[in-house]
Image (tube, rainbow, N blue to C red):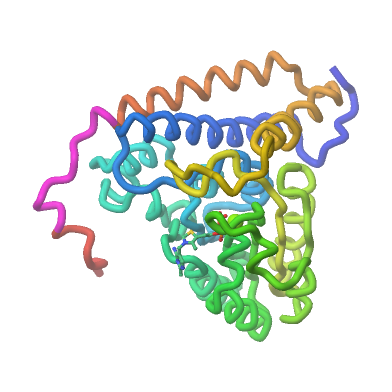
Amino acid sequence: MADVNPFPLERQALLQCYRTMRTIREFEERLHVDFGRGDIPGFVHLYAGEEATAVGIMSHLGDGDRIASTHRGHGHCIAKGVDVVAMMKEIYGRKGGSCNGKGGSMHIADLSRGMMGANGILGAGAPLVCGAALAAKYRKSGEVAISFVGDGASNQGTFLESLNLAAVWNLPAIFVIENNGYAESTARDYGTAVDSYVDRAAGFGMPGVTVDGTDFFAVHEAAGEIIKRARDGGGPALLECKMVRFYGHFEGDAQTYRAPGELDDIRNNRDCLKKFAAEVTGAGLITAEELTAIDHEVLGLIEDAVAQAKAAPLPTAADLLTDVYVRY
Ligand SMILES: Cc1ncc(C[n+]2csc(CCOP(=O)(O)OP(=O)(O)O)c2C)c(N)n1
Ligand SMILES: [Mg+2]
């Protein structure tokens, strides 16, 4: 075992980050199978392949920090600490789910964890984040708010207006662009005029950083700097994470727009979990056996979550009339 830790996180924190990334991966792999069997109602977009971005960023946050997610939100939820069993029940449309089974995959929220919601409307989270960041600034809480959007959603007017508002009000807001190269089947370059989102950030008067979103340590470092800056009153920033999605846009997507060999290439060469494992074992800080033990533990957790989801009751007609309005 190495005496010197070359990483910015202690061993236990590294193991925890690996566990969270592995939990997201296995959650998604299991949904892929269960959706294919017809067990899951509604629409599902998988986050598999993108785990290092969610966990690299969320490892800097507490429950008081708020995030607004996307239609591809399971990874953000798990990394923000939302209960995996409640999430599985939600996706299965059951009582006891994060929203009592009435929201499904694209509407998971848990305000107790600062997770303001996945969102079926592209770009809708960014204005919410301006509100949360304004509240944090007003209360002088030192908390930050983070908006996630994809490369496609980054062209929405709501997103661009939010960048401007956050800069004008010097808000503790971070705008993360998860650039996986596609908006549904449209390649990024076909629909976005600029090559670099850093240039776009400059146009709104805020710093922008681009990182390899499949490299946990690169994301963690860049996010740490801009989150600290925001907490200290330095204002908003934009973070572009270049990443890959392992599955189609949605479950059932035939992916005819992919280049030949593309999926094999990203699974073999751009798997953020494999990269993380190679780094920490290569440094002699964590053993392959320790990681394998976590893999087994996570598989058990997912199996249990699915069993609990399948055993949970469906909402009833009377449940349609609850959770409609906030009670004061
Ligand atoms: C306002 C709005 N326009 C269009 C859609 C349909 N839509 C859903 S996902 C998607 C593509 C999103 O691509 P991107 O933002 O890159 O995210 P990714 O799916 O790649 O994670 C589109 C066009 C929508 N949900 N909301
Ligand atoms: Mg995309």
Q: Is residue 171 left or right of residue 276?
A: left
Q: Is residue 243 above or below residue 280?
A: below
Total labels: the figure holds 0
User: What residue is shown at x 60% (from left), y 72% (from top)?
Assistant: 155
User: Image quadrant for the C terminus?
Assistant: bottom left
Q: Is residue 210 left or right of residue 75?
A: right
Question: Residue farthest to the right?
Answer: 4
Q: Is residue 130 left or right of residue 195?
A: left
User: Image quadrant for the N terminus?
Assistant: top right
Question: Between 243 and 202, which is closer to the camera in this rendering?
Answer: 243
Let me know if residue 13 appears in the view: no
Question: Residue farthest to the left?
Answer: 318
User: What residue is shown at x 77% (from left), y 66% (from top)?
Assistant: 195
Question: Between 248 and 285, which is closer to the camera in this rendering?
Answer: 248
Q: Is residue 32 above or below residue 151?
A: above
Position of residue 123 measured from the top left corner of the image (x, y, whole percent): 52, 69
User: What residue is shown at x 80% (from left), y 23% (from top)?
Assistant: 281
Question: Between 194 and 110, which is closer to the camera in this rendering?
Answer: 194
Position of residue 38 measured from the top left corner of the image (x, y, whole percent): 31, 33
Quarter of the figure with residue 225: bottom right
Q: Is residue 119 above or below residue 44?
A: below
Position of residue 131 measured from the top left corner of the image (x, y, whole percent): 51, 75
Question: Residue farthest to the top?
Answer: 289
Q: Is residue 271 magenta?
A: no
User: What residue is shown at x 23% (from left), y 42% (from top)?
Assistant: 95
Magenta span of residues: 310-320
Let me know if residue 115 appears in the view: yes
Q: Is residue 82 left or right of residue 56?
A: left
Position of residue 72 measured from the top left corner of the image (x, y, whole percent): 50, 51
